[in-house]
C-alpha cells in the first residue's frame, strides 16, 4: 500500500488533482482484503467475504473515479481546503497524507485478515447476519447514488437540492448505508477468531463520515453552493439516519 499510494501521489501531482486518493482508497481496501483471503486459504466463508468486499470496492471505487474524472480539473472541496492549509508545502504534505491513507487501508481491512486466518469454514449465524446487513448497505448506497445521479442529470441548476427517494429522508443516505456496510463487514468477521477485536473498523468509518471527511465538509460546500435552499433542507431533513422529514412550521 505504501507503493500504491506513492504511485497515486505521483499521478495526482502530475495531474494537479489530489481527489483521486478517494478512489485509490476504495480500491486499496478491496485489494488488501482480497489478497489476504486468497493467500490464506479457501472455503465458503472466505469466498463469500471476498465476493462482498470485491463488489463493494469496485462499485465505490468506480463511482468515485467517474465523479473525479467528471469534475477534473476541479478538486473536491476538502482538498482545496488542504491546499490552503498547506500553502507553500502542498506536494510534500500531500505525500504524507497519501501515505497515511495507505496505513488506514491496511488498518480498516483487518476484519478480512481475521476472516482469512480462520481455518474453521463452518457457516454460523454471524456470517448470515453480516451477509444480510452488508447486502442491505450495498443496495441502499447504490440506490442513493443512482437517485442523486438521476436528479443531477435532470436538473442543470446547481442550486437545486435533491429531495427525491432516499434523499427525502436523509441528507446523506449514501453515507448512512456506507456505515451499514462496514457494520456488516464487522458482524461477518465476528464469526471468526478475534474478528470481534476489529470493531475499530466500523467505528472509525462512522466517525469519519459523521465528524471528519463526510458530512461536515459536504454540508459546508452545499451551503456555499445552494444557499437558503440547502439551509431549509437542513432544517427539515435528518442528517444521517433516514427518517420522515419534519413538517414546515407556518
Image (cartoon, rainbow, N blue to C red):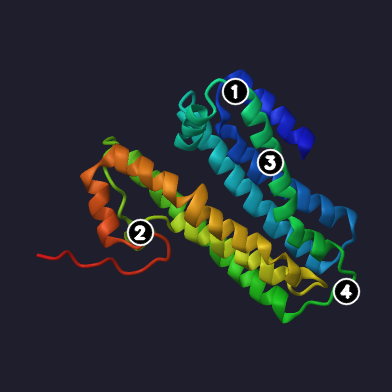
**Which residue is identified by label 1?**
89
Left or right placement of residue 68 versus residue 36 in this view: left
Q: Earlier in the sequence, mark 3 or mark 4?
A: 3
Could you say whether the residue bearing mark 3 is in a helix, strand or loop?
helix
Instruction: Please state, as top left, top right, bottom left or bottom right, where the N terminus lies in the image.
Output: top right
Q: Position of residue 40 (x, y in %)?
A: 89, 58
Number of marks: 4
Q: CA distance from mark 4 to mark 2?
A: 42 Å
Could you say whether the residue bearing mark 1 is in a helix, strand or loop?
loop
Left or right placement of residue 120 versus residue 232 in this view: right
Nearer the viewer's eye, disc 1 or disc 4? 1
Q: Which mark is residue 165?
A: 2
Q: Earlier in the sequence, mark 4 or mark 2?
A: 4
Q: Position of residue 76 (x, y in %)?
A: 48, 34
Nearer the viewer's eye, disc 3 or disc 4? 3
Q: Are marks 3 and 4 in contact (CB under 8 Å)?
A: no
Q: Position of residue 83 (x, y in %)?
A: 51, 28
Q: Is residue 143 above or below residue 150?
A: below
**Which residue is identified by label 4?**
120
Could you say whether the residue bearing mark 2 is in a helix, strand or loop?
helix
Q: CA distance from mark 3 to mark 1?
A: 17 Å
Left or right placement of residue 210 versus residue 91 in this view: left
Q: Which mark is residue 100?
A: 3
Residue drawn at x 55%, y 64% as measured from the top left: 180
Q: Are marks 1 and 2 in contact (CB under 8 Å)?
A: no
Within 10 Å of the Cα at label 4, are there few (<14), some (14-19), or many (20+) other Cα atoms?
Answer: few
The one of 195 and 47 positioned closer to us in this rendering: 195
Nearer the viewer's eye, disc 4 or disc 2? 4
Q: CA distance from mark 1 to mark 2?
A: 43 Å
The one of 146 and 216 positioned closer to us in this rendering: 216
Residue drawn at x 31%, y 69% as measured from the top left: 244
Q: Earlier in the sequence, mark 1 or mark 4?
A: 1
Amino acid at each position: 500500500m505504501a507503493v500504491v499510494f506513492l504511485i497515486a501521489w505521483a499521478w495526482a501531482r502530475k495531474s494537479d488533482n489530489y481527489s483521486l486518493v478517494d478512489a485509490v482508497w476504495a480500491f486499496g481496501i478491496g485489494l488488501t482484503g482480497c489478497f489476504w483471503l486468497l493467500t490464506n486459504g479457501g472455503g465458503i466463508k472466505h469466498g463469500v467475504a471476498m465476493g462482498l468486499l470485491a463488489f463493494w470496492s469496485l462499485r465505490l471505487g468506480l463511482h468515485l473515479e467517474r465523479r473525479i474524472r467528471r469534475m477534473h480539473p476541479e478538486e473536491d472541496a476538502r482538498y482545496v481546503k488542504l491546499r490552503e492549509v498547506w500553502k507553500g508545502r502542498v506536494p510534500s504534505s500531500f505525500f504524507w497524507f497519501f501515505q497515511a491513507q495507505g496505513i488506514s487501508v491496511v488498518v480498516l481491512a483487518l476484519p478480512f485478515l481475521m476472516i482469512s486466518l480462520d481455518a474453521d469454514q463452518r457457516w454460523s449465524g454471524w456470517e448470515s447476519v453480516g451477509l444480510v446487513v452488508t447486502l442491505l448497505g450495498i443496495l441502499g448506497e447504490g440506490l442513493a447514488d443512482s437517485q442523486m445521479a438521476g436528479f443531477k442529470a435532470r436538473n442543470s441548476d446547481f442550486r437545486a437540492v435533491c429531495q427525491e427517494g432516499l434523499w427525502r429522508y436523509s441528507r446523506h443516505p449514501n453515507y448512512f448505508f456506507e456505515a451499514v456496510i462496514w457494520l456488516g463487514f464487522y458482524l461477518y468477521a465476528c464469526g471468526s477468531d478475534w474478528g470481534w477485536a476489529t470493531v475499530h473498523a466500523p467505528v472509525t468509518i462512522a466517525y469519519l463520515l459523521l465528524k471528519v471527511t463526510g458530512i461536515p465538509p459536504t454540508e459546508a460546500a452545499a451551503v456555499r453552493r445552494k444557499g437558503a435552499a440547502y439551509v431549509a433542507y437542513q432544517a427539515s431533513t435528518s442528517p444521517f439516519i433516514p427518517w420522515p422529514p419534519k413538517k414546515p412550521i407556518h
